[in-house]
Amino acid sequence: MKLIIGNKNYSSWSLRAWLAAREGGFTFEEIRIPLFIPGSRERILSHSPSGKVPCLIDHGLAVWDSLAIGEYLAEKNPALLPADGIARAVARAVTAEMHSGFQNLRGRMPMNIRKDYTGFGRSTEVDADIARIGAIWNDCRSRFGAGGPYLFGAFSLADAAFAPVAFRFRTFSVKPAGAAGDYLATLLANPHMQDWAAAAHSESESIAEEDLYG
């Protein structure tokens, strides 16, 4: 199994697939391709039909897009989704909402692990996205979180989906209240998240479009 990813400092989509694979207990070769430099698209296309990361290669089968990769891994290890049918449906719903939504947050608060952008990126629309994320976290922890510290107790694809948000919130000093704040601390303390962050800090590449605030 191989996983093609981009820069760890910037590539939120790569983080989702990588974290799901790590938490799912899979052994894989990590192929990191720095983005937006000469030759990077050609290198990615040699693995990924979409020309984008992440892309999982398993015995010659290419699975691209972080949501599809997560579902593929969950078929191999069902523990990546809640066992209860209602919880599983909600987990899929909030994962899909994160996958397709929150465009204002994404645009004004990109994942940039090496930076401290305290005070930047806020707007009425971004604040609405932040409030919705906090509501999701509080609701899932209240309804389904009795069995552990994650959204549905044990780690699931929903946690992988929101992992980049945790780094964004740290970079921009967003501090949710209540259970959502505790959950943010749980994600940031996850050993695999800490490994990813350490690797991001060791990278030398800089993408100007992602370094929005200097």
Image (cartoon, rainbow, N blue to C red):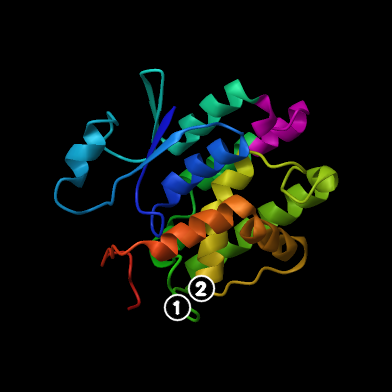
Which residue lies at the image location 34% right of the left edge and 48% below the top edge? 6
Which residue lies at the image location 26% right of the left edge and 67% below the top edge? 208
Given the current orientation, which residue lies at the most extreme right position? 146
Percent coordinates x, y for residue 103 in the rendering? 43, 55
Residue 19, quarter of picture: top right
Which residue lies at the image location 49% right of the left edge and 66% below the top edge? 125
Span colored in magenta: 78-91
| Other-residue count near label 2 (Cα within 10 Å), few / some / many at <14 / 14–19 / ≥20 | many
Query: Visible in this render: residue 130?
Result: yes
Residue kind at label 1, given as amino acid type: Phe
Q: Which mark is residue 172?
A: 2
Q: Is residue 104 left or right of residue 152?
A: left
Query: How would you classify the magenta stretch by its main secondary structure?
Result: helix
Which quadrant does the N terminus fall into?
Answer: top left
Measured in 3D between alpha carbons, the distance from the residue under mark 1 to the one under mark 2, in whole angstroms, is 7 Å
Q: For mark 1, what is the residue?
A: 120
Relative to the observer, which residue lies in front, 181 or 8?
8
Query: Visible in this render: residue 111?
Result: no
Residue kind at label 2, given as amino acid type: Phe
Relative to the observer, which residue lies in front, 196 or 126?
196
Residue 190, quarter of picture: bottom right
